Amino acid sequence: MEAKDDSGYKHVWEICADVRLIFKNAMKYTNEKNDLHVMARTLLAKFEEKWLQFLPELWKRKMSAEEERQVGIALTSHKAIH
């Protein structure tokens, strides 16, 4: 999700944090019996359920990127030595 002024999210983790914050604030500042509170609680539970399904793929991609970085460092170090 990008903004025209380049102030958008840099990673999906940031979006996740904001979604949680929005729902938690909705629950914090409304009465438990209020429709908004109930909706926020329900949507947060659904979001967390979907997030857990999405998380393994994120870790796989993150690990893959980290492994690529490690290989790049190793190659650079190897070239510097020889």
Image: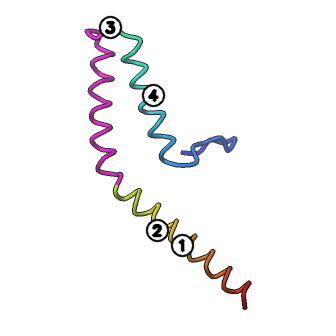
Amino acid type for the residue under numbered disc 1: Glu
Give the farthest residue toward the front. Answer: 81
Residue 21: x %, y % from top left: 45, 28
From the image, tell me which residue sits under label 2.
Answer: 64
The part of the chain drawn in magenta is 32-55
Q: Is residue 49 above or below residue 22?
A: below
Assess whether residue 35 is covered by the magenta stretch. Answer: yes
Q: Residue at x 39, y 15 (%)?
A: 28
Say whether marks 3 and 2 touch (CB < 8 Å). no
Q: Residue 21 shows which numbered tag?
A: 4
* Kind of residue sitting beneath label 4: Leu
The residue that mark 1 highlights is 68
* Quarter of the picture holding the C terminus: bottom right
Residue 6 figure quarter? top right
The rendered magenta stretch, by its main secondary structure, is classed as helix
For badge 3, the amino acid type reads Asn
Q: Earlier in the sequence, mark 4 or mark 1?
A: 4
Q: Could you tell me the amino acid type at mark 2?
A: Ser
Which one is in front, 39 or 21? 21
SS assignment at label 2 = helix
Q: Earlier in the sequence, mark 3 or mark 2?
A: 3
Q: Residue 31: which disc?
A: 3
Helix or strand or loop: what does disc 4 sit on? helix
